[in-house]
């Protein structure tokens, strides 16, 4: 919680107002923020100064790992996060690549599981990573990237959290995750949960110990219609101890993740929190 609160204070104290063309709103913005999560200690980074709904974050991550490109599939897992971007984004609604209701296009997990090759076919980045790590191999390029500028026009949204770089030292797995843009009041805890859970889950299916996850954010911001709630409500509250995340130990392979894993296979214990805050969401 301390690093989250420190970032919020830093944005308020040092941030610069920037006009955001996509949303039509101003953002109070700082450049570069580094956070770290002790997955080895199971210090689950769930915000305690407001109630945070962690299940949607992990459900969305599962959809990425499965390569989903349709908001309906995410909803079945328990994530409604793509409904607006798939169906209420005016630029995407008028895009010739859109296949219909709930279609997201070639975003996030599609790139991770089926990156198009110029000479035909595709690359399954995630399978390569899991296969290598399971064999104890780290080629210094165990990288899962969703950022494909050549296909931005074929999706409803450029990825915010765009790259996950895994590293293996002996039998301990580490993760460096990179995010180009972050809505700190609303989106950051979602992203924190995903970085933590991704390392924990990949370590489990590859038979490795989970180490530390490092999370770099380039553009960290608070929207102008969120600032009052952050300053006068959330930052006035005292943080509580970190909860713990428990993953079903029967999840042992990428095939398991692809076929039968649901949100019933994840549990959070010891979560004490203040009441929820309804921050405005910008599409």
Image: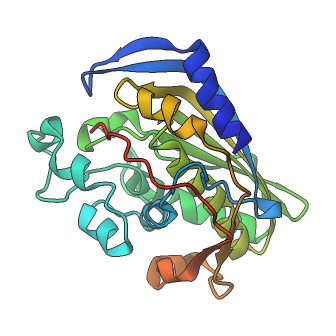
Q: Work out which residue is located at the far right of the displayed protein and give it.
A: 170
Task: Say left or right for 99 vs 115.
Answer: left
Q: Vertical placement of 263 versus 129: above or below?
A: below
Task: Say left or right for 40 vs 7.
Answer: right
Measuring from the top left, give residue 67's x and y in whole percent: 40, 63
Q: Quadrant of the N terminus?
A: top right
Tell me if I can see residue 181 in this picture: no
**Residue occupying the point 53% across, 43% down:** 188
Measuring from the top left, give residue 88's x and y in whole percent: 16, 45
Measuring from the top left, give residue 37's x and y in whole percent: 73, 50
Q: Nearer the viewer, residue 127 or 239?
A: 239
Q: Vertical placement of 128 versus 162: above or below?
A: below
**Residue occupying the point 41% across, 48% down:** 117
Task: Say left or right for 38 vs 234.
Answer: right
Q: Vertical placement of 207 versus 176: above or below?
A: below
Tell me if I can see residue 279 in this picture: yes
Measuring from the top left, give residue 47's x and y in whole percent: 60, 51
**Residue occupying the point 65% across, 88% down:** 250
């Amino acid at each position: 919680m301390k690093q989250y609160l420190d970032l919020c204070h830093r944005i308020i104290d040092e941030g610069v107002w920037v006009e955001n063309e996509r949303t039509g709103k101003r953002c109070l913005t700082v450049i570069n923020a580094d956070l770290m999560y002790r997955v080895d200690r199971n210090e689950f980074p769930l915000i305690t100064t407001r109630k945070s709904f962690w299940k949607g974050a992990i459900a969305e991550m599962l959809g990425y790992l499965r390569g989903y490109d349709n908001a309906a599939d995410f909803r079945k897992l328990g994530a409604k996060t793509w409904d607006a971007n798939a169906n209420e984004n005016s630029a995407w609604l008028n895009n010739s690549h859109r296949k219909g209701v709930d279609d997201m296009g070639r975003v996030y997990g599609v790139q991770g599981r089926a990156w198009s090759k110029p000479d035909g076919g595709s690359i399954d980045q995630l399978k390569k990573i899991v296969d290598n790590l399971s064999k104890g191999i780290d080629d210094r390029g165990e990288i899962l990237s969703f950022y494909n500028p050549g296909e931005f026009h074929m999706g409803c949204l450029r990825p915010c959290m765009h790259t996950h770089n895994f590293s293996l030292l002996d039998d301990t797995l580490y993760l460096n995750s990179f995010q180009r843009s972050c809505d700190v009041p609303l989106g950051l805890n979602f992203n924190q949960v995903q970085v933590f859970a991704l390392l924990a889950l990949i370590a489990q299916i590859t038979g490795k110990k989970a180490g530390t996850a490092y999370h770099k954010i380039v553009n960290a911001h608070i929207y102008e219609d969120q600032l009052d709630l952050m300053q006068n409500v959330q930052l006035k509250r005292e943080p509580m101890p970190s909860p713990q995340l428990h993953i079903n130990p029967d999840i042992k392979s990428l095939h398991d993740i692809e076929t039968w894993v649901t949100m019933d296979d994840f549990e959070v214990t010891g979560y004490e929190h203040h009441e929820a805050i309804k921050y405005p969401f910008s599409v």
